[in-house]
Amino acid sequence: MKQLVLASNNAGKVRELDAMLAPTGFTVHPLSAFTPVQAEETGLSFIENALIKARHAAAASGLPAIADDSGIVVDALDGAPGIYSARFAGPHASDADNNALLLQKLAGLPASQRQAHYHCALVFVRHANDPAPILCEGLWHGRILDAPRGNGGFGYDPLMYFDALGKTAAELDSATKNRLSHRGQALQALLERLPTTDRDS
């Protein structure tokens, strides 16, 4: 069975990606199994940060690595919080803190001006110095409500509403969310591009 390490600072992301990878035959190890040191996210884009994290995880573990960098992009805020989604309200902000700040910044805007999308970048590297990493992205478009709804998911899920579904991301069951989400789209694209030697062992 093929081994890989999953690099993420976010427990919710680790949980979702581990569930999505479970049927593929990979044995997934968290980065924390090899090092407590997280990569310093110095990139200016989701792809740059995902690549930094993937190379760090591969170097620490000696295994192929998958890394995710994702967040919410709000049109009315010129793309913010973007790559700073997890620390929008500060370096140690909780999900509730970040949601409260987003609502504050969008206060008074009508639904027609509250469009947003989730953006996910996934990177797979065979080793830390892989010259040809596999890069995949996924987008999930919706809009920001003026109050949270639902108890599932994590991050901005209680505020991210999808008109076609009539629900927020936090109101979806995990299987539906994993199938439709930005992360699910990116992972499906990534799995289709993985070398067959990384699938069979």
Image (tube, grey):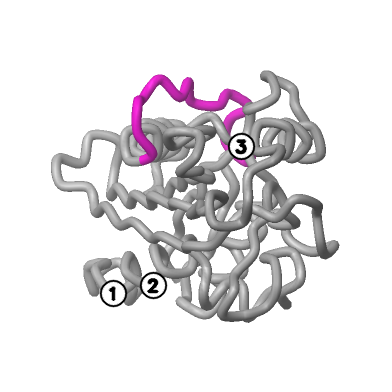
Secondary structure under tag 3 reads loop
Residues packed near mark 1 inside 10 Å, few (<14), some (14 to 19) or many (20 plus): few
Secondary structure under tag 2 reads helix
Residue shown at the point (85%, 62%) measured from the top left? 151
In the displayed structure, 8 sits above or below 144; it is above
Q: Nearer the viewer, residue 89 or 116?
A: 116
**Horizontal and vertical percent for residue 32?**
63, 38
User: Is label 2 in contact with label 3 (beta carbons under 8 Å)?
Assistant: no
Q: Which mark is residue 9?
A: 3
Q: Which mark is residue 11?
A: none
| Residue at mark 2 to residue at mark 1: CA–CA distance | 6 Å
Q: Which residues are magenta?
A: 32-46
Amino acid at pointer 3: Asn
| Dot placed on the residue nearer the N-terminal end, 2 or 3 | 3
| Residue at mark 2 to residue at mark 3: CA–CA distance | 21 Å
Residue shown at the point (27%, 52%) measured from the top left? 135
Q: Nearer the viewer, residue 141 or 37?
A: 141
Residue identifier under label 2? 188
Q: In the picture provided, is 37 more to the left or to the right than 155?
A: left
